Image: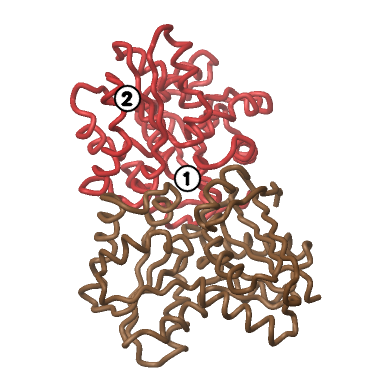
Chain colours: A red, B brown
Amino acid sequence: MNQRSIGVFDSGVGGLTVLKALMRRLPAESTVYLGDTARVPYGTKSPEVVIRYSLSNARLLMRQQIKLLVVACNTASSVSLPALAKELEVPVLGVIEPGAQAAVQVTAGRVGVIGTLGTVNSGAYQQALAQARGGLEVMARACPLFVPLAEEGWTEGEVVEAVARKYLADFEAFGADTLVLGCTHYPLLKGAIARVVGPQVRLVDSAEATAEAAEGLLRDGGLLACAGAIAEHRYFVTDLPERFAEVGARFLERPIERAELVDL
Amino acid sequence: MNQRSIGVFDSGVGGLTVLKALMRRLPAESTVYLGDTARVPYGTKSPEVVIRYSLSNARLLMRQQIKLLVVACNTASSVSLPALAKELEVPVLGVIEPGAQAAVQVTAGRVGVIGTLGTVNSGAYQQALAQARGGLEVMARACPLFVPLAEEGWTEGEVVEAVARKYLADFEAFGADTLVLGCTHYPLLKGAIARVVGPQVRLVDSAEATAEAAEGLLRDGGLLACAGAIAEHRYFVTDLPERFAEVGARFLERPIERAELVDL
């Protein structure tokens, strides 16, 4: 069982920022990643549709004999975890609770959250933050243009800063001291976001926190791979494998040699 | 047969600009519109996936007893028409050939085309323009951020003009005298696009030309509704009917009272 892979899915390439953190923290672990590029994006879709897509993604990964499922997509994490946990016989980990825990460790009390429409409307971060520490002030806002900007590769310059100023102005009035990047695409825009909100605001990216939580889950379950095991990394997509490999390499910061096309 | 509806599909709300033109030109015609909001957008997906989605959309509309299918989506029109024409027993009309015809009527010889990645990569406009008139110079460019900008409602102001300047700069060097808005979302950004390219460039929107072509097809087939018939307009979506009705009203410029949720 402990030689099995960690399964990771996202609506597309964004979850590769989480995979990158997993690979760095757990270099002996094999992984299998599914990017649902035929149905991307999830952030503008209803909870019912996102749950249906999440279940079909998880079933594909279960057929690859995984020992842990990491939902590396904030939108899917915000609505699908109960349905996934009910159906699967392996542990399921989302990115929202680790992100909320990481925010609580650095905030002085006023937390901003940015994400997709689906994530923000679900209230999942607001709830996770309230459970992590009582008395926090939280303000959440959807930033729909950040995902296409990251995918277009326009991560610096006039356009992204103008968009960021427009979305983030209200957090200054709110007095946020911490801003949660509640979408796996947003770390690519970190430079521009940091310049707009200023150095007094701490940016929290849930990728590292999620990798740490994954390590804890595997250790507690006696599921860690043997130290020194040769890790294999496989990639599945539902559309456009060449484009996934090309854009994904920017997110993963290492080449993706091959992504296999599957039909859900 | 002539009392049947015109079926129209798009990946989401964009095709409502075509529906609006159809309603204006053919006020006695009933329509049934399908927005595939669970799988939107099509513009970033492969031809194979777009053809599969187009066929499933068309089958749903055929069950509504339509007499003509209008593919009100440039990406779907650019790759799906042969497969649709082969399967369906009613005439099928896309937006690309009418758009190319409209461009040819106004251009002095240098035509720019903007659209999604899927549309531009298909080469469909380039081919339709070449067939409509020999010797044209054509330059095409994908503008992936225009769709999310239109859906966000950021159709005027600093951000959209900065994006438009970035995408459209090359058309000035090329010397385009005509620019085809090769995506049904783009007419919403017409003001900003016009300011960036300047008054010497004619903008061509295929909605009107498509409505005119639809009228011609119905007349030739003896399929026009009786003058004075009471037209009914129905809407189906695959996700988020309330959001479709709200955003769609901006595209259609009339209220959408009800959209019915269907599962493809």
Identified at 52% across, 24% down, the residue is: A93
> A175 and B49: which one is in front?
A175
Q: Up-down: is B117 above or below B98?
A: above
Residue labelled with disc 2: A179
In the image as oriented, which residue stretches furthest toward the top?
A: A134
Instruction: Name the quadrant containing residue A221.
Output: top right
Picture coordinates of residue A197, whole percent (x, y): 23, 29
> Mark 1 falls within which chain?
A
Mark 1 to mark 2 CA distance (whole Å): 23 Å
> Mark 2 falls within which chain?
A
User: Can you see residue A33?
Assistant: no
User: Can you see residue A192?
Assistant: yes
Q: Residues within 10 Å of mark 1 (few under 14, many from 20)?
A: many
Asked whether, in this view, residue B147 is left or right of residue B141, the answer is right
Mark 1 residue type: Gly
Earlier in the chain: of badge 1 and badge 2, it is 1
Picture coordinates of residue B139, whole percent (x, y): 33, 76
Asked whether, in this view, residue B214 is left or right of residue B251, the answer is right
What element does badge 1 sit on?
loop
Picture coordinates of residue A101, whole percent (x, y): 40, 16
Evaluate if marks 1 and 2 touch, with contact meaning CB atoms under 8 Å apart. no
What element does badge 2 sit on?
strand
Q: Which mark is residue A12?
A: 1
Q: Up-down: is B178 above or below A109?
A: below
